[in-house]
Image (cartoon, rainbow, N blue to C red):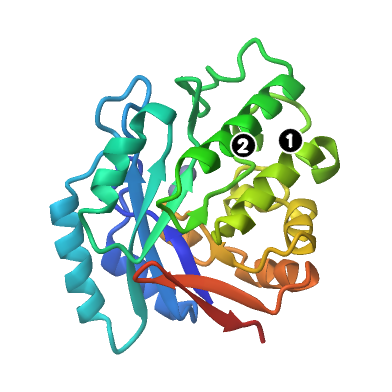
């Protein structure tokens, strides 16, 4: 299996060393690891937490790819946080480097941070979830320079609500629009196991959404840990494998040079 979403000390929110991360991936039997460090222009309240020296990052990734080429596949990726007004500057960075994989994520909605609670403050759960999903759809309709839609129900993690579920049946119209758009654009989704680490009791998105993606004709699904620490690389991948297979997929997908590569689930 491939871990398609891992952060490193290049990101302001991780101090994980890349070589140790690769060693952990090898020891857990993974076939590949994609480093996807953050690029979030205009992240509220932080000027540069999620901005990186990409020249340095790119050169370093090229060197460790070579260094470990006999042991494991290493991929150079990026996770871009999309807001409507940062699309042009984000595309400029994406096009300046030879990334293997670009993950698109929505971390900020209406210029309000999901992470610190600003976005959910004074919204009912229904209002917050609906507005977040509308924003994901808008992102997909206005931005297409990516390969994988990241943690598409991330709002579950940051809502200050007792019930942290987001079932397909509760937002079926919006989720159908989102999933159909992803399929039409030939993009992949990820199943992000960090949901377990944030007490969501399931990966992001959950099984009901993954199953619907398959029913609508979705074919490409990546396995992701979103690890920021060593112990989380490849986290709960046996569970992900089972979940993906139960939803009707025979393959998982990873990306090399922005091209999807399918691996049969055994
Ligand atoms: Zn993210
Ligand atoms: Zn991430």
In the shown orientation, is residue 14 left or right of residue 201?
left
On-image quarter of the C terminus: bottom right
Mark 2 and mark 1: Cα distance apart in space: 7 Å
Mark number displayed over residue 157:
2
- The quarter of the displayed image where residue 207 is located: bottom right
The picture places residue 27, in percent across and down from the top left corner, at 44, 79
On-image quarter of the N terminus: bottom right
The picture places residue 252, in percent across and down from the top left corner, at 60, 74
Q: Give the residue furthest to the top.
A: 122
Q: Which residue is mark 1?
A: 164
Q: Give the residue furthest to the right.
A: 169
Q: Is residue 110 above or below residue 231?
A: above
Measuring 69% from the left and 67% from the top, which residue is drawn there? 239
Number of labels in the image equals: 2
The picture places residue 64, in percent across and down from the top left corner, at 22, 72
* Mark toward the start of the polypeptide (2 vs 1): 2
Q: Nearest the camera: 2 or 235? A: 2
Mark number displayed over residue 140:
none
Measuring 17% from the left and 72% from the top, which residue is drawn there? 63
**Do we see residue 249 in this rendering?**
yes
Q: Are marks 2 and 1 in contact (CB under 8 Å)?
A: yes
Give the crowd class for mark 2: few <14, some 14-19, many >=20 residues within 10 Å.
Answer: many
- The quarter of the displayed image where residue 57 is located: bottom left
């Amino acid at each position: 299996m491939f871990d398609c979403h891992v952060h490193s000390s290049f990101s302001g929110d991780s101090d994980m060393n890349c070589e140790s991360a690769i060693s952990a991936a090898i020891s857990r039997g993974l076939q590949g690891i994609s480093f996807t460090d953050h690029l979030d222009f205009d992240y509220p309240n932080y000027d540069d937490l999620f901005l990186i020296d990409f020249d340095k990052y790119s050169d370093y990734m090229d060197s460790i790819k070579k260094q470990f080429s006999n042991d494991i596949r290493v991929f150079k990726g990026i996770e871009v946080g999309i807001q409507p007004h940062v699309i042009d500057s984000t595309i400029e960075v994406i096009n300046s480097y030879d990334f293997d994989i670009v993950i698109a994520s929505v971390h900020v909605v209406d210029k309000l941070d999901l992470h610190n609670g600003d976005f959910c403050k004074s919204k009912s759960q229904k209002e917050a979830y609906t507005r977040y999903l509308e924003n994901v759809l808008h992102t997909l309709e206005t931005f297409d320079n990516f390969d994988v839609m990241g943690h598409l129900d991330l709002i579950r993690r940051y809502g200050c609500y007792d019930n942290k579920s987001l079932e397909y049946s509760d937002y079926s119209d919006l989720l159908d629009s989102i999933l159909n758009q992803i399929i039409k654009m030939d993009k992949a989704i990820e199943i992000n196991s960090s949901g377990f680490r944030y007490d969501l009791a399931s990966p992001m998105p959950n099984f009901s959404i993954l199953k619907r993606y398959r029913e609508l004709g979705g074919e490409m699904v990546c396995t992701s840990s979103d690890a920021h620490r060593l112990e989380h690389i490849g986290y709960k991948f046996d569970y992900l494998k089972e979940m993906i297979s139960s939803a009707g997929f025979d393959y998982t997908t990873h990306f090399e040079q922005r091209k999807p590569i399918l691996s049969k689930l055994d």
